[in-house]
Image (cartoon, rainbow, N blue to C red):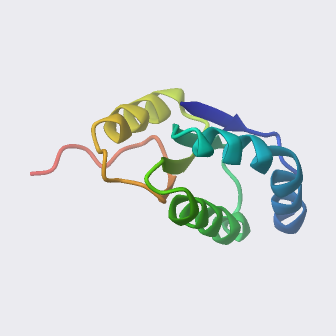
């Protein structure tokens, strides 16, 4: 299940507070039902990485064996490709992935 998060305030502390007050209850409800959930955040500055990464890691630990991961991107093609990858990676949970959409190209 994909859950688009946003818009959030630009300030990291305000964004975290908004998420915890407004969105977290829905996330916990979905995870308590055993959902496989991917949060999709809009790109944000580096100051948002810490709270986002810790949020998804903490939720994964608290709600195992339910799975949760998070992405940060505005590139729908990159999001779709990552969602497909996550669907085929049943052991992957608790990860925060910032996508740039440019890709590294094929591995040689």
Q: Residue at x 67, y 34 (%)?
A: 4
Asked whether, in this view, residue 11 is left or right of residue 99, the answer is right
Q: Quadrant of residue 53?
A: bottom right
Q: Depth check: 9 or 27 in front?
A: 27
Asked whether, in this view, residue 29 is left or right of residue 25, the answer is left
Q: Position of residue 51 (x, y in %)?
A: 70, 68
Q: Depth check: 74 or 54 in front?
A: 54
Q: Is residue 27 visible?
A: yes
Q: Depth check: 20 or 5 in front?
A: 20
Q: Residue at x 63, y 38 (%)?
A: 30
Q: Quadrant of residue 11?
A: bottom right
Determine whether 51 is above or below 88 in the image.
Answer: below
Q: Is residue 99 visible?
A: no
Q: Position of residue 43 (x, y in %)?
A: 66, 48
Asked whether, in this view, residue 1 is left or right of residue 105, the answer is right
Q: Position of residue 54 (x, y in %)?
A: 62, 69
Asked whether, in this view, residue 68 is left or right of residue 106, the answer is right
Q: Residue at x 65, y 71 (%)?
A: 50
């Amino acid at each position: 299940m994909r859950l688009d998060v946003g818009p959030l305030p630009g300030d990291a502390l305000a964004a975290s507070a908004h998420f915890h007050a407004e969105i977290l209850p829905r996330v916990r409800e979905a995870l308590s039902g055993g959902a496989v959930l991917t949060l999709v955040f809009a790109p944000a500055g580096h100051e948002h990485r810490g709270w986002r990464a810790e949020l998804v890691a903490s939720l994964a630990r608290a709600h195992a064996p339910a799975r949760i991961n998070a992405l940060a991107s505005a590139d729908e093609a990159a999001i779709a490709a990552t969602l497909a990858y996550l669907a085929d990676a049943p052991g992957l949970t608790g990860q925060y992935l910032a996508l740039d959409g440019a890709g590294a190209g094929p591995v040689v």
